[in-house]
Image (spheres, rainbow, N blue to C red):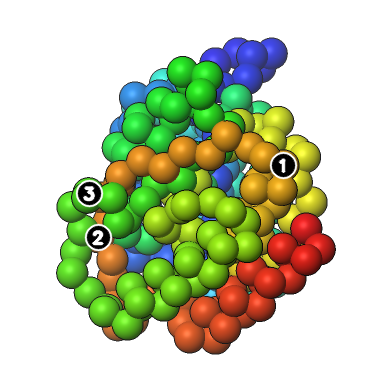
Amino acid sequence: MSAERAPKLSVVIPVYNERQTIEEVLRRVDAVGIEKEIIVVDDGSTDGTRELLEHLAEDSPHGFGPAGAGHDHLKIHFQPTNRGKGAALRRGFQEARGDIVIVQDADLEYDPQDYFQLIAPIESGIADVVYGSRFLGGPHRVLFYWHSVANKVLTIVSNMLTNLNLTDVWTCYKAFRRPILQQLVLKEDRFGFEPEVTAKVAALQCRIFEVPISYSGRTYAEGKKIGWKDAVRGLWCVLRYKLAP
């Protein structure tokens, strides 16, 4: 990838206290055979993640992995304080140069090999935005019944207000044509990003597709962060951004 030519894909990874998983996530993202840049935004980590990323940035300024990642490039940015996933994503989106932008969490719940089906509708010219749904038949770890109930309720409310028929508004895996992201004014600092961006791409009348993805959820003991307060905030965001997108 030359300095003048943009990559096909920008993978934006917000990170907060993921010392145990971030290296493996980067390896898995790097292993995907798509021309890409990898943009990591550390959101004020305090568990050693920041120091690990600083070390990676020093050792691999032009890429990641034992072979230097070929034409793929790793860019690492540091937020001065913890502001939340939405704030970290805004920073990453500002830095993105790819034709398509994908959100990737820094845990091991989502499989980067699903990028191929995520970007296929955009590459074929039929979609502007693609959601990777955990509820369309892909393999998934069985966990947290009440989480799935809350997700479905929030997705139904979002669909009622946006007139979409999504199955998984709260999925991490969302792919955008970059010009679409450049039109959005995003405000949410935490997990409210999910319903906010959904309301705003709906208001733009984007062509939205869903594809099945695999999902290996983790428990709170394993580091899961989203909780019931985020669900309440999510409901408020659904209403807010429908009324004032």
Q: Which residue is mark 1?
A: 204
Tag on residue 216? 2
Residue 152 vertical placement versus 176 (above, below): below
Q: Nearer the viewer, mark 2 or mark 3?
A: 3
**Where, quadrant-wise, is the C terminus in this rendering?**
bottom right
Q: Nearer the viewer, residue 131 or 92?
A: 131
Mark closer to the chain start, 2 or 3:
3
In this image, 95 relative to 235: left or right?
right
Q: Residue furthest bottom?
A: 229
Kind of residue at badge 1: Leu
Instruction: Report, in whole angstroms, how far the alpha carbon at label 2 lies from the one at label 3.
Output: 10 Å
Q: Which residue is mark 3?
A: 138
Q: Circle 1 — which element?
A: loop
Mark closer to the chain start, 1 or 2:
1
| Residue drawn at the location 18% of the way across and 69% of the way down | 142
| Residue drawn at the location 40% of the way across and 69% of the way down | 152
Instruction: Report, in whole angstroms, how far the alpha carbon at label 3 lies from the one at label 1.
Output: 29 Å
Residue 201's x, y, as percent? 66, 46
Q: Residues within 10 Å of mark 3 (few under 14, many from 20)?
A: few
Residue 157 vertical placement versus 106 (above, below): below
Residue 131 visible in the current orientation: yes
Residue 149 vertical placement versus 12 (above, below): below
For the residues bearing labels 2 and 3, Cβ distance under 8 angstroms: no
| Residue drawn at the location 53% of the way across and 29% of the way down | 127
In this image, 154 relative to 84: left or right?
left
Residue 116's x, y, as percent? 35, 30
Kind of residue at badge 2: Ser
Which corner quadrant of the image does residue 240 belong to? Answer: bottom right
Mark closer to the chain start, 3 or 1:
3
Q: Nearer the viewer, mark 1 or mark 2?
A: 1
